[in-house]
Amino acid sequence: MKKISSLVLSLFAVSLLSVSCAKKPVVINDGFVLVTGGTYKMGSNDIRVPWGYYDHPEHEASVSDFYISPVLVTQKDFEEVMGYNNSFYQGNDKGKIVEEGEEQTLRPVEKITWYEAIVFCNKMSAKMNLEKVYYMKTSDSEQSYDETTWGNPPEKSSESWNKIGWNKDANGYRLLTEAEWEYAARGGAETQFNSAGFNYDDEDVNDFCWNDKNSKLKTHQIKLKKPNTLGLYDMIGNVWEFCWDWFDEDYYTSTAASELDACGPLTADFRVVRGCAWDDYDVSLSYVSRGSSSPHLSSRRVGMRLARSVPVGKKAKNKKNKTAKKN
């Protein structure tokens, strides 16, 4: 029997991968949550956002159905797929050591670049016998999905790596778009709260996210806080999450932002990160707070979460589907 990745075993507590014969569709039961697409009001016109973060004006956004991991990628998952773990929060040094009662390997991976996150997605897809999503252009007419031919993720900004493409018809693992991320954080089609169904002024904020008041200024094991209405953990706090999109402070004032499955400007200098981290304070703990990161730089405050596309023309079926209900 083919060995199943711990990304299925340890993160999602679902240990079944069923791959059918040729000419039949691939059936995946990896614990991902099916998010039914829809149109929603993204952003806010009156949210308070701290200096250094960005909000975006309220506008209409539309997303198709997609699958999202209920949890962040852990250090264990990343090391098993990539063969290394450069996370800052490991070891016995003061300020890094895992909190008593928590498991070190189940802390979120961080200190990864956006380039590394893209490679992880492709390697994870291959491991699970899914189609790779990302490709690098090797010429004007050719492209390679084989990440081993791309070279090591560069330590400086790279034109070829910045032009990595996304095959939206592939069924493998990928990063969320910014619009998908906020839609899921709000609770999907039927609820329009923030990530945990609370307002950031509420006293129960600490029940839902790791922040500067309860984290002891370090990361924590996944799934220890309450999930949002879709069953998603750590959407706010613990670590920021890389998105696919290039970051443009003014993108959401453009008409392109209201198109179905908008995924940001064609190019820029930074990639979007969402969700806030272990050191963020109450006023920033919001689904509309935006951050950015150079694709070649890493931070102990930034990690990742996986998503998958729903095959075009096929109705998604997944017993893990949790349609959001109003609180």
Image (cartoon, rainbow, N blue to C red):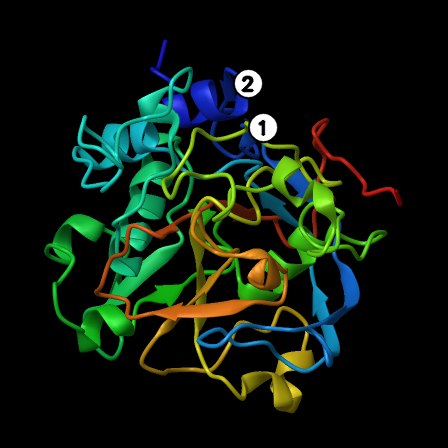
What is the count of numbered marks?
2
Q: Which residue occupies 45% across, 52% down?
A: 277
Q: Which residue is mark 2?
A: 14
Left-right relation of 325 to 300: right
Image quadrant in which you'd find residue 252: bottom right
Residue 271: give x, y in percent of width and height.
38, 70
Residue 164: give x, y in percent of width and height.
30, 67
Left-right relation of 54 to 63: left
- Packing grade of label 1 (10 A; few <14, some 14-19, many >=20) is many
Which numbered disc flags the more N-terminal residue, 1 or 2? 2
Kindly tell me whether residue 246 is visible in this rendering: yes
Callout 1 amino acid: Gly
Mark 2 secondary-structure assignment: loop
In the picture, the quarter occupied by the C terminus is: top right
In the rendering, which numbered label is found on residue 90?
Answer: none
Q: Which residue occupies 69% across, 80% down?
A: 258
Q: Which residue occupies 24% across, 57% down?
A: 298
In the rendering, which numbered label is found on residue 31?
Answer: 1
- Packing grade of label 2 (10 A; few <14, some 14-19, many >=20) is some
Above or below 219: residue 117: below
Above or below 300: residue 34: above
Left-right relation of 247 to 16: left
Disc 1 and disc 2: Cα gap in Å? 6 Å
- Asked whether disc 1 touches disc 2, contact meaning CB atoms under 8 Å apart, the reply is yes
